[in-house]
Image (cartoon, grey):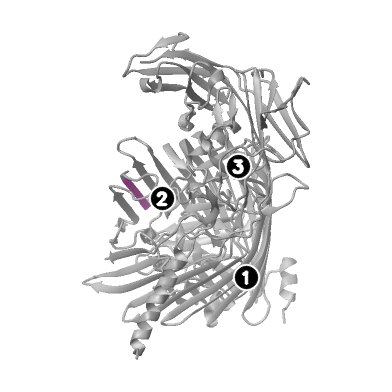
């Protein structure tokens, strides 16, 4: 039976004390093997009944109602650690968590038994590196593709690594690296992510409504936490069929450093339409902790580059993404933490005469953002308070030549500011959070309230509710389905004037049972209402000549997932039933299915030890058909002349005439991926060799499109592309 | 008598063939009902006093396609174009070619024109703004002589969008049976280099400025199987566009 008493007391602002003034205990949680700060570790005071999570520097402050008390520290993929606190020494605790030998399931559902308190954040998935590396892959393990273990994440097709969250477009997701803005972190046509998994500690997926500290996201945030250097020099390398990567990190006095890099080169990339063109890609990462007085200045640097040009014609494309972020954390008083931060992030893209859907394009795109800000968190007796602010400058350039519908050129610089504040109240049985974010520039002010509530409802079950608004002051509109063409682009538009502000209101309810007692389960329902949704107009169904269209959207659905793990086996299964619709004609016009609306989605993720240090991992996905715009008729085109159209000629191609947009459904798609890994030790090093096959089942993975049959044949519907099984061999060695 | 091992081997092969067959890009057949759509195609041209609109019915999606005109079984009761100043231009059906409708007028650069076709139970509408004038700035002369092996450098200016095309035609515009307009002659550039072999004898080199919708409609020739086309005609399909041009006489080899 749910006890509402604590909830009422909580809401009344009455602290939950057992007696005596509470005292704060500070500490840092690190990885035992390399002293890397661990973000998101849960620290639970058993007697005081309080639980906190570590921040990006691994720091925590937990208020103890009485002494002695015991801290239990837990984190996915690591052994729990217990620390007895009998008296306060005034020195911050240093807690190190050992890696867990048990297999890590792809999905771990947190419940009460895992942390000793009601977890507050619903619809959040945290994926450690081991999970990201274990997922079957093509070319090599990919951080962004591996996000498919979260049922809220989908992709337009298996050839895209751009995550889509719950029925919204790729531009609605904010990808972060150590919390800093990462722009277009992709290689070759968004087939691959540009962040090498071997340099990653964890990747977190948060679906809207996210915390108010996150901006520039209306569907969700993917926060990739990179590795850091430890107390000893350690590193490794990996080679696969296509790439080579290396990483190393260690101490520099009391500072830390970590660098990683990856490289691939093809003399002739076997990808249309850029065959006979050499292709090179690189990505590099650096993370440094530099002592500044008593404070640790943390620097994150990232760069990626792609280049492919035909030697003879000069046609091709190149793009790069760069990030430099700095963070200076400090403590304030007994329970406060301050963080000053700044970032520079940039993306640029040059395309010369590369076809997209048969239309040659020239593109010159630039996007850069620079920001400074601060964040303060104060952990009190029974409440946590957070607030912060930032000032940001964005420069956006779009220049398109060619293509079916070409957006107008853009070269604009905007300045905006944001501020946020939120308060957490937690107890054994109830946790609540309310917050507000405000983003503003010269043309717009976006108020974004957000709230969450979680309560224990009996046994190990937790009921969570969340609602909130998210907004952006600019549009990031991606081509929704360029594949299989290896060309991608974004169109940016500042909101204001005729361009609406993108706003999303979300609500969700979730019931979950933690995996700590054998089987974790989660079932939830979500809904969203979208305004100012922008999209690239792929075909001009309404006769308009604008490259973009703006409208409204709505989405809703239910999710269910379950996971289980023991010493040799891990498994998770999820099912999503969802709807996502758009309306482009204004109020009164009908809603039509979103281009990637799939009603049903089932995923099965299994891992099993099958011998001494052999492991088999599989990923299976089945999804119901995407919407399809049918072809209802065919006509013969006239011939263009300076004096008009000529039709009384044998010339003139047949063209297809579409019916109502997205009025039909295409085909079911699905696939099975498999990975077999053997871990080994070699002297003082440890390694793994693995074989992975994407689409081992050789099943249909892409939606169908209409095309005219050859030699004047009837209209046919064929998959966008076939995807034969793609094998990958990977050898990884770490010292 | 077959051994169980043989049976399993055959089943394994059959399963593998089945799995492979699942992935092959074979056609699928969604339950699509075809429709008969009225297709109107027209480009108002500032280079002609006679404007033509082609009005036809579409072909079926299920059968093999055959080229040729497909006039409506019942002619439209009204085919008109009006400009924003209220002038009305009625298009009359060509008695020799029931798919062809003509009117005598010359569109004005920069002016907007609205099309209306009342066809049986359907009404088709569309609008276009005629591109602003285009001027050849290179070559500077109206007539040039191009020796064999040379290329003609062409440059132009236009206050319209970046939707251009070019064509080489016989000098007499009234005698075109098979115009030598090339599908790949649409361009976003404002310069051009045309080799001498394009000019056999005396020819006209046209540089065209199109409205954006027409440019896209005709540019889709590249891969019509990748992208369906509708154009800008509401209530039907096709294109109602406009073209303006400048030209130079080229005396080729």
Give the prevailing secondary structure in the magenta stretch. Answer: strand
Q: Nearer the viewer, residue A209 or A720?
A: A720
Asked whether the residues under the numbered discs 1 and 3 touch, taking CB atoms below 8 Å apart as contact, a structural biologist would say: no
Look at discs 1 and 2 and give the one toward the viewer: 2
Question: Residue A242's spot in the image, x, y percent?
Answer: 31, 56
> Local crowd at mark 2 within 10 Å, few (<14), some, or many (≥20)?
many
Q: What range is drawn magenta here? A: A279-289
Q: Which mark is residue A635?
A: 3
Question: Label 2's element?
Answer: strand
Pointer 1: what residue? A21
> Local crowd at mark 3 within 10 Å, few (<14), some, or many (≥20)?
many
Q: From the viewer's perspective, is residue B250 above or below residue A342?
A: above
Quick check: do tags 1 and 3 share a chain?
yes
Q: Is residue A677 left or right of residue A562?
A: left
Whether residue A104 is visible:
yes
The CA distance from mark 3 to mark 2 is: 57 Å
Question: Label 3's element?
Answer: strand
Q: Quarter holding the C terminus of chain A?
A: bottom left
Question: Label 1's element?
Answer: loop
Q: Which residue is at 70% across, 33% downward?
A: B126
Q: Which mark is residue A300?
A: 2
């Amino acid at each position: 039976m749910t006890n509402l008493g604590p909830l009422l007391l909580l809401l009344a602002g009455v602290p939950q004390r057992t007696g005596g003034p509470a005292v704060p205990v500070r500490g840092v949680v690190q990885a035992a093997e390399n002293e890397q700060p661990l973000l998101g570790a849960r620290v639970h005071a058993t007697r005081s009944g309080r639980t906190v999570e570590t921040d990006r520097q691994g720091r925590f402050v937990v208020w103890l109602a009485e002494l002695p008390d015991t801290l239990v520290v837990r984190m996915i993929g690591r052994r729990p650690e217990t620390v007895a606190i009998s008296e306060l020494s005034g020195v911050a605790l240093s807690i190190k968590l050992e890696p867990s030998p048990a297999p890590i399931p792809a999905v771990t559902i947190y419940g009460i038994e895992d942390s000793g308190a009601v977890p507050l954040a619903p619809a959040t998935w945290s994926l450690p590196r081991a999970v990201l590396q274990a997922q079957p892959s093509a070319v090599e393990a990919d951080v962004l593709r591996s996000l498919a273990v979260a049922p809220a994440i989908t992709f337009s097709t298996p050839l895209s690594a751009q995550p889509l969250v719950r029925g919204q477009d790729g531009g609605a997701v904010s990808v972060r690296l150590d919390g800093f803005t990462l722009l277009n972190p992709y290689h070759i046509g968004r087939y691959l992510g540009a962040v090498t998994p071997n340099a990653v500690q964890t990747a977190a997926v948060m679906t809207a409504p996210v915390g108010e500290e996150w901006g520039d996201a209306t569907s969700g945030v993917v926060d990739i936490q990179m590795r850091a250097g430890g107390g000893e020099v350690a590193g490794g390398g990996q080679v696969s069929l296509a790439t080579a990567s290396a990483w190393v990190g260690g101490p520099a006095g009391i500072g830390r450093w970590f660098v990683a890099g990856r490289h691939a080169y093809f003399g002739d990339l076997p990808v249309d339409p850029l065959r006979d063109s050499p292709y090179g890609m690189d990505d590099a990462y650096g993370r440094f902790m530099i002592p500044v007085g008593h404070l640790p200045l943390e620097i994150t640097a990232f760069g990626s580059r792609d280049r492919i040009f035909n030697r003879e014609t000069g046609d091709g494309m190149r793009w790069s993404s760069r990030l430099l972020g700095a963070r200076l954390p400090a403590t304030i008083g007994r329970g406060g933490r301050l963080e000053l931060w700044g970032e520079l992030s940039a993306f640029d893209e040059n395309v010369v005469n590369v076809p997209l859907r048969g239309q040659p394009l020239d593109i010159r795109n630039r996007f850069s953002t620079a920001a400074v800000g601060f964040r303060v968190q104060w952990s009190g007796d029974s409440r946590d308070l957070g607030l912060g602010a930032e000032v940001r400058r964005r420069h956006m350039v779009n220049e398109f030549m060619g293509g079916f519908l070409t957006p107008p050129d853009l070269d604009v610089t905007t300045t905006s500011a944001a501020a946020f504040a939120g308060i957490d109240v937690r107890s054994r049985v109830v946790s609540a959070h309310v917050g507000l974010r405000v983003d503003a520039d010269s043309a717009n002010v976006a108020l974004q309230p957000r709230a969450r509530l979680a309560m224990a409802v009996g046994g190990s079950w937790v009921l969570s509710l969340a609602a909130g608004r998210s907004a952006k002051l600019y549009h990031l509109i991606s081509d929704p389905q360029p594949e299989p063409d290896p060309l991608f682009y974004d169109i940016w538009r500042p909101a204001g004037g005729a361009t609406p502000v993108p706003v999303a209101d979300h609500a969700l309810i979730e019931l979950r049972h933690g995996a700590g007692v054998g089987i974790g389960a989660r079932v939830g329902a979500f809904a969203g209402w979208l305004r100012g949704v922008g999209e690239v107009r792929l075909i001009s169904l309404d006769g308009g000549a604008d490259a973009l269209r703006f409208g409204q959207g709505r989405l809703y659905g239910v999710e269910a997932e379950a996971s289980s793990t023991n010493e040799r086996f891990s498994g998770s299964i999820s099912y999503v039933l969802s709807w996502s619709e758009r309306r482009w004609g204004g109020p009164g016009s009908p809603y039509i299915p979103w281009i990637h609306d799939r009603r049903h989605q089932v995923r099965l993720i299994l891992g099993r030890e099958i011998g001494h240090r052999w492991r088999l991992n599989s990923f299976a996905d089945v999804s119901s058909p995407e919407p399809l715009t049918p072809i209802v008729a065919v006509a013969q085109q006239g011939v263009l002349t300076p004096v008009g159209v000529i039709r009384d000629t044998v010339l003139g191609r047949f063209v297809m005439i579409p019916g109502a947009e997205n009025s039909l459904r295409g085909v079911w798609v699905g696939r099975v991926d498999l990975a077999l890994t053997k871990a080994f030790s070699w002297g003082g090093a440890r390694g793994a060799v693995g074989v992975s096959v994407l689409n081992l089942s050789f099943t249909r993975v892409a939606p169908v499109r209409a095309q005219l049959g050859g030699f004047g044949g009837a209209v046919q519907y064929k998959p966008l592309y076939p995807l034969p099984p793609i094998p990958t061999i990977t050898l990884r060695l770490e010292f | 008598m077959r051994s169980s091992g043989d049976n399993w081997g055959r089943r394994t092969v059959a399963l593998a063939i089945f799995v492979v067959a699942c992935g092959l890009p074979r056609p699928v057949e969604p339950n699509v009902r075809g429709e008969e759509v009225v297709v109107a195609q027209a480009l108002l041209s500032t280079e002609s006093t006679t404007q033509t609109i082609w009005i036809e019915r579409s072909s079926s999606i299920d059968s093999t396609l055959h080229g040729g005109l497909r006039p409506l079984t019942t002619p439209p009761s009204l085919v008109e174009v009006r400009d924003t100043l209220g002038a009305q231009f009625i298009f009359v059906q060509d008695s020799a070619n029931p798919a062809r409708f003509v009117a005598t007028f010359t569109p004005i650069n920069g002016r907007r024109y609205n099309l209306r076709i009342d066809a049986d139970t359907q009404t088709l509408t569309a609008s276009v703004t005629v591109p602003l004038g285009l001027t050849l700035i290179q070559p500077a002369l109206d007539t040039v002589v191009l020796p064999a092996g040379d290329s003609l450098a062409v440059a132009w200016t236009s206050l319209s969008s970046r939707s251009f095309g070019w064509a080489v035609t016989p000098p007499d515009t009234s005698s075109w049976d098979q115009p030598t307009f090339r599908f790949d002659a649409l361009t976003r550039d404002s310069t051009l280099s045309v080799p001498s072999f394009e000019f056999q004898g005396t020819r006209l080199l046209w540089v065209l400025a199109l409205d954006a919708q027409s440019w896209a409609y005709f540019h889709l020739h590249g891969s019509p199987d990748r992208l369906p086309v509708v154009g800008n005609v509401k209530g039907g399909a096709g294109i109602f566009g406009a073209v303006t041009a400048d030209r130079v006489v080229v005396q080729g080899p």
